[in-house]
Every structure is written in C-alpha cells, then in structure tokens.
Amino acid sequence: MENKHTYREYKFPNGETIKCTVAFKFLLKLREQNKKIYKKLNDSIMNGIGEDLFDSVSILYGAYICGCYAGENGGEPAIMGESEFIEKIEDDVVGVFNACFDLINKKKN
C-alpha cells in the first residue's frame, strides 16, 4: 500500500511551490528536532492561531519541514532556515493565513 499524506501546497511569491504536511509521524520528528517550531504549530492546531502574526509563519514553516521529512521539497538536506523561509514569503500575509487555515482544518488535497 502506498504511503499517502495530506499535503497543502504553498506557492512563494517568486513562483516556487512547496508541499506542507502535518502528518503525525513527521510532527513527532519535528517535536524531537525543533521543539520551538513544534510547540507553536501544535498550540495553533489545538487552540487556533495565536495573537502573534508570526504564529502563522511558524505553522507554515513547521509544516514545510514536515514535508521535507516526508521526502518533498528536496528532502531533509534541503531544509531552509527560518530566516530564509521568512524572506521567501515576503509580504504574502493572506497566502500564509490561507495555507495555515487549510493545514489546521485538515483539508485533504
């Protein structure tokens, strides 16, 4: 049986597309390797996006990392740092919020 995960694609303003997931097996790895990002992502999934605008960026970034763990986006060796990720999203507030909403509400693609 093929291993399938629920992905949400996000397109950076420069046209590059990444796949994001919040599949449990990859969240576990995120929790082990990046507790700060995992905590923000987990809190937002459980309680909704917080009061800080950057909570939504952390959700998307964490889901992007999980996508890399799943072998997408160039895999683990290609994981970009948080600062580079923030630079790539530029001022796409609406796109980031929409992607987070889709991830948190577990919309299947």
Image (cartoon, rainbow, N blue to C red):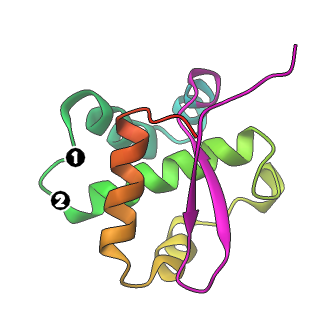
Helix, strand, or loop for circle 2?
Answer: loop
> In terms of image quadrants, where is residue 95?
bottom left
Residue 22: image x %, image y %? 53, 34
Q: Which mark is residue 16?
A: none
Looking at the rendered structure, the kind of residue marked 1 is: Ile
- Counting from the top left corner in percent of width and height, residue 34 is at 53, 42
The disc label shown at residue 52, or none:
2
Which residue is pictured at 60% across the width and 33% down the height? 6
Q: Nearer the viewer, residue 72 or 33?
A: 72
> From what the image shows, is residue 60 above or below residue 66?
below
Residue 4 belongs to magenta span: yes
**Depth check, front residue: 23 or 51:** 23
Image coordinates for residue 98, horizontal then vertical, percent = 35, 58
Quick check: 28 above or below 13? above
| Residue linked to disc 1 | 49
In the image: residue 16, left or right of residue 38: right
Q: Residue at x 20, y 38 (%)?
A: 48
Residue 90 percent location from the top left of the image: 43, 84
Q: For the point 43% across and 46% down, which residue is it? A: 37
Question: Bounds of the magenta span?
Answer: 1-26
